[in-house]
Amino acid sequence: MQQQKVEVVTHFHRVVPLKHALFERSLGFTTMNRIQKKYRRLAGQSPSGRPEAPATTHIDLIRAIKGDYLPCLFFTFSRRKCESNAFELGEEEDFLNAEQKSQVTEAIEGVLERYSTIESGRWPHLRRLLLKGIAYHHAGMLPVLKDIVEELFTRRLIAVLYCTETFAVGLNFPCKTVCFDSSTKWDGNSFRPVTNREYFQMAGRAGRRGIDEEGFAFMVVDLNYFDPSQFPSMKEDEVEPLQSQFSLTYNSILNLVKNYSEEEIYRILGQNFATYQASAERQGVLVELEILEDELAPYIKNLRGQEQFVKTLRKRLELESELNRAYNKRTRSKLKKEIRALTQRLDSAFYRAFPQRDRALLRRENRKFRRKVKAYERLLLREQALNPLERYIREFEDKKALLEVLGYLEHDELTSAGIFASQIHGHELMITEMFMEGLFHAYPPAELNAVMVAVGYEPRKNEFRIKHKLDFGPLLRIYHHLQKLERHMVGYPSVQFHDHVAALAYRWSSGESFTKLLEDTSVDEGDLVFAFRRGIDLLRQVRNAAAEDPVLQGKLRECISLMDRDEVSIWL
């Protein structure tokens, strides 16, 4: 194949220019420098050293922009706050005239014709907000409610839409202004600053082509909680680079083994964006290593050359890693002794470079030498980490070995279990083990639906488990066996089984209404629909993979029909 040079073209010009500003109630639209000056002045006047100022809220910003800057998308990094902010604004503002309210009512009726009755506690409150030109949008809502909000926003009948960042991904709904009520977000583990990439993904919605001469992005600043390090730079040329999310699934390994030789597989593993990214960064590390090698050259020759020097350092790194994992006193003592011996070997190479000088006078230079050696070790570790092909090959071999232990592969050929697993995309180990154990035949339809919703389910923070009397004993044995096997052979478990909403899936499949389900759970209605839809997807995959079992196919069709009804069948 002929090699062709690929040129990277960078283009920062926007058809509709985007203006950025911070907003604080006493300063109005302002800059980071002015915010910092006011913060320091107020902090100096406060006995606590922290400024004491009236809080700046989303309402303050809406009042400032409602004349010339609407419609507005107001990004809020919490579902609950999305709703509460909309309710607060609805108590104070009404953006629609009588004719527009009539258009909203007409649009809502048009959408409702496509659906059955909406069973959602949110709907009465949301409808009142919509008639004022205010709305909210997040993943926890029923699809029909999101459809109504999107329809009205498209028709320019919503002036202010509070939304989470999911609205910025995959949905093309431009507006004149984008606002942010915070510069930090919860990422599942902790609060962290919004990155420049995330900021521009959302701010980029501002400015409607052919309608607006310019777009605007404003971020609320509350001086009581101000920290300049927690804000994005708002400079487009400082957007963080994309990071590869390439991962090796068991399904992909089975299909690689099925279709390619070992040599071809290793070549394919090296042809991904992660390898490309790492190879570019690795070149920089190699240059730094060469510079240090030149500085350490007089001492390296006393260790019988570069190869022996690197070998000594790698051995010391290996021993230090073992020491960090060791708890036995005797083992730790032995490891420390070996590490000291290697350090002494390195020091000896240093001192031999100055045979005529007193060792006591060389201690300062020796400390510098040790620091350079440590820097070289850190670069070795970085260089090793920046070799993703080696990491992917190791992961491939570890996971392939696990598949052989499970009986999915024999002599690089897929067994019947392997062929089945190769057709399941997601949670393939759990699903295949269930299939091979005959559990798809054993469970009645409603119980099987409960099982499928539990496989791979990820409960949200503070979500409580709904108790049930379903017999999940065989499944839990499979789950714990796979977890133990993965920890031992791969290093981390990937299987997931959480029966937090299994009882709701069982009751739904037994004919209970969606409203009744919601009375017994803290799970958002949109999340519950998503969980049921994901269960339906897994059932369809199993049905397709079990093409030679007409009895099971018929049963799985029944399972799908029990779950794929009413609110759950509406999926946008």
Image: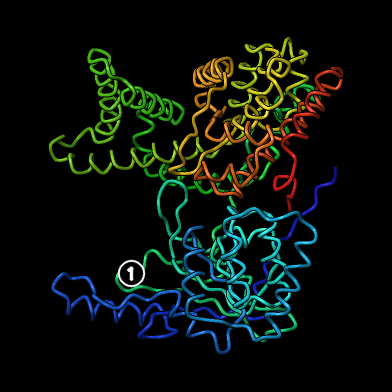
Residue 289's place in the image compared with 100, above or below, is: above
Q: Who is closer to the viewer here, 42 or 149?
A: 149
Q: Position of residue 140 (x, y in %)?
A: 58, 52
Q: At 71% from the left edge and 32% from the top edge, which residue is drawn?
A: 538
Q: Which amino acid type is shown beneath numbered disc 1?
A: Phe
* Residue that label 1 marks: 226
Q: Who is closer to the viewer here, 127 or 458?
A: 127
Q: Is residue 61 left or right of residue 200?
A: left
Q: How many tags in the picture?
A: 1
Q: Position of residue 460 (x, y in %)?
A: 49, 43
Q: Who is closer to the viewer here, 511 or 100?
A: 511
Q: Who is closer to the viewer here, 164 or 494?
A: 164
Q: Is residue 63 left or right of residue 5?
A: left
> Which colour style is shown?
rainbow
Q: At 61% from the left edge and 61% from the top edge, which residue is drawn?
A: 123
Where residue 279 sits, quadrant-wise, is top right
Question: Among all residues in the image, which is located at the extreme bottom?
Answer: 67
Residue 1's place in the image compared with 449, above or below, is: below
Q: Secondary structure at mark 1?
A: loop
Could you classify mark 1 by the number of other residues whose Cα lies within 10 Å: few (under 14), some (14-19), or many (20 or more)?
some
Residue 197's place in the image compared with 539, above or below, is: below
Q: Is residue 360 left or right of residue 18?
A: left
The N terminus - image quarter: top right
Where residue 349 sits, quadrant-wise, is top left
Q: At 70% from the left edge and 64% from the top edge, which residue is drawn?
A: 148
Q: Position of residue 487 (x, y in %)?
A: 50, 21
Where residue 141 sits, quadrant-wise, is bottom right
Q: Position of residue 104 (x, y in %)?
A: 70, 75
Residue 23's place in the image compared with 79, above or below, is: below
